[in-house]
Amino acid sequence: MINANTPETLSELERLQSEIKRLKRENYQLESKANSYRKKYLRYHAFFEISSDPFYITTYPGPPTENYPNPRDYLKQWKIVEVNNTATRIMGYSKKQLAALSLDDIATHNASKSKQARSIMTELVNPIEKGQMFNIERNHIDCRGNKIEVEIKGQAVSIGGVKYIASLARDISYRKKLEKEILKSYRLEKHCRQMLQREIANRIEFTRTLVHELKSPLTPILASSEALLNREKPDSLNAELARNIYHGAKSLNACISELLDLAKSEISGLTLQKISLLLNPLILEIAGELTPYIQSHKQELILDLPEQLPAVLADPERIKQVLRNLLNNAVKYNRGKGLITLRAWARDSLVTISVHDQGRGICKKDQMNLFKPYFRCPQDRAGTEGLGIGLALSKQLIELHSGEICIRSARDKGTTVIFTLPVFSDTGRTSGKQDD
C-alpha cells in the first residue's frame, strides 16, 4: 500500500499540480492565439469571398526549365489550391472540382508558339521572380467550353515557407468588345475623314478653276466699261449703259473674290499681312469710297469716330474688305432714305466698330445662321444680290485678327453688326495673338 503522506508523494503531487497549471496557461494562450487566427482567417476569408472577381490561389513550381516542351506541361504544375465563390459561379465548377484542376485545365495555352504562350516568361514568370506584381491578359475556358477574356493581376505570397500565387481574374470581355467597336469606329471615321478631305480638296480645286475661268473674261469687261465711262458724257445713254456694265462686272468680281477667300479659309489658306494700323484714315477711306454708292440708293452714311483710335495690328486690305461687306449689307437691307451709322470706340484694350442700319431687322431664328456660308434670310433671297458669304468671310477674317464679331437686331429697329480688334501694344503684340 502507498502512503500518500510521505514526503516523496507530496512532492510529486505538487510537481503535477504545477505542471497542470502550466499546461492550462499554455492551453489558454494557444486558445487565445487560435481565436485570434480564427478571427483573422474569417476576416480575410470574408475579403476573399466578397470579391466580385474570381480569386485564385495556386502553387508555384518555380521558373520553367529552358527546354520545357510546351506551355501546357509547365502550366500543369500550377495546381489550384483555393478559389472563392465568384470563381465557381463564373467558371461553372464547384470548389472541389476546381481544386482538382491546374491552370492548364482552364487556360488556353494550347499552341506552344501562340502569342500567349510566348509571353509566359516575360509577363508572368519574370515579375514573380523579381517579387513584383504581374498583370496579364488571358483567355479562360469555363466548364461549358466558353471562352472568357480576363485580366489577371497577382503576386507571389509565402505561406509556411511555401510559395503560392494569389491572383484576381477580372472579366474584360465587355471591355474588349468595346475596344473592338471603338477600333472599328476609328477606322471608319479615318476612312470617312480621308474621303472628306479628298472631296474638300476637289472642291477647292474646282473653286479655284471656276474663279480663274470667271475672272478671265471679267477683266476686259471691267477695263472696257471703265474706258467707255471716261470717253462718254456723264449724262448720256452710252455712259449710263457703260456705268451699269461696269458696276455689274465689279460686283460680280467682288463675289468671285469672296468665294475664293472663303474656300481658302476652309483649308486655313487665308494669310494676313499685319502691320501697325491706324483705323481713322482707313475708315474715312472706305467711307469716301462707298459714299457715292450709298447716295445712289438715297441713303446717308453717318460717321461717329473719336479724334484718334489707338493702333491695331491688322491687315489693312482685309479690314477694308470687312468694312465693305458690312456697309454693302447695310445698304442692301436698309429702308428707303434710311441712315447708316458707323461708330468706333476704344475700351479695355479693344477697338470696337459697329455698323447700324434702319432696316426691318432680322428675327432671332435667322440671326443664329447669319455667319454660315451661303445662308440668306428667306425673305431676302429673291430681292437682293449676292452669294450669302460676306458675313461668313468677315467672321473668318476678324477671328484671324484675334477679334470677335456679332449681330444685334430686332424687328423694325434695324440691325447692328459689331466687331472688335485688340489694341496694338508697345511690345509688338496685341492683347490676342502675335502677328501671323
Image (tube, rainbow, N blue to C red):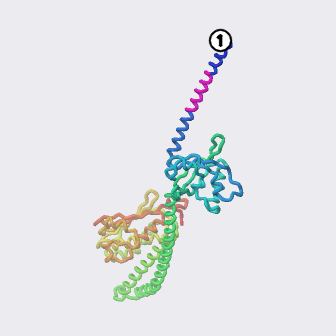
Q: Name above or below for residue 11 compared with residue 83.
A: above
The boundaries of the magenta stretch are 20-35
User: Residue 293 location in percent, x, y?
Assistant: 36, 76
Please tell me which residue lies in front, 375 or 255: 375
Identify the residue at image location x=55%, y=36%.
40
Examine the residues drawn in magenta and state their main secondary structure.
helix
In the picture of the structure, the residue carrying the numbered disc 1 is 3
Q: Nearer the viewer, residue 244 or 178?
A: 178
In the rendered image, residue 152, in percent from the top left (x then y), is placed at 57, 52
Q: In this view, does 141 lie above or below 208?
A: above
When asked about the image quadrant of residue 136, the answer is: bottom right
Nearest to the observer: residue 353 or residue 265: 265
Type of the residue with mark 1? Asn
The residue depicted at 36 percent of the width and 87 percent of the height is 241
Which of the image's four quarters has the C terminus? bottom right
Asked if residue 26 shows in the view, the reply is yes
Which of the two residues, 45 or 306, is positioned nearer the viewer here? Answer: 45
Residue 21 lies within the magenta run: yes
The residue positioned farthest toward the right in the image shown: 66
Q: Which residue is drawn at 38% across and 85% down?
A: 245
Query: Mark 1: which secondary structure?
Result: loop
Relative height, residue 22 to residue 218 (above, below): above
Instruction: Locate residue 238 relative to residue 313 in the image: left or right.
Output: left
Q: Position of residue 158 (x, y in %)?
A: 64, 43
Q: Where is residue 387 in the image (x, y as percent from the top left)?
A: 39, 76
Using the rendered image of the protein, determine whether residue 308 is visible from the camera's viewpoint. no
**Residue drawn where x is 66% and y is 59% of the image:** 70
Q: Does the magenta stretch include residue 92?
A: no
Q: In which quarter of the image is the N terminus?
A: top right
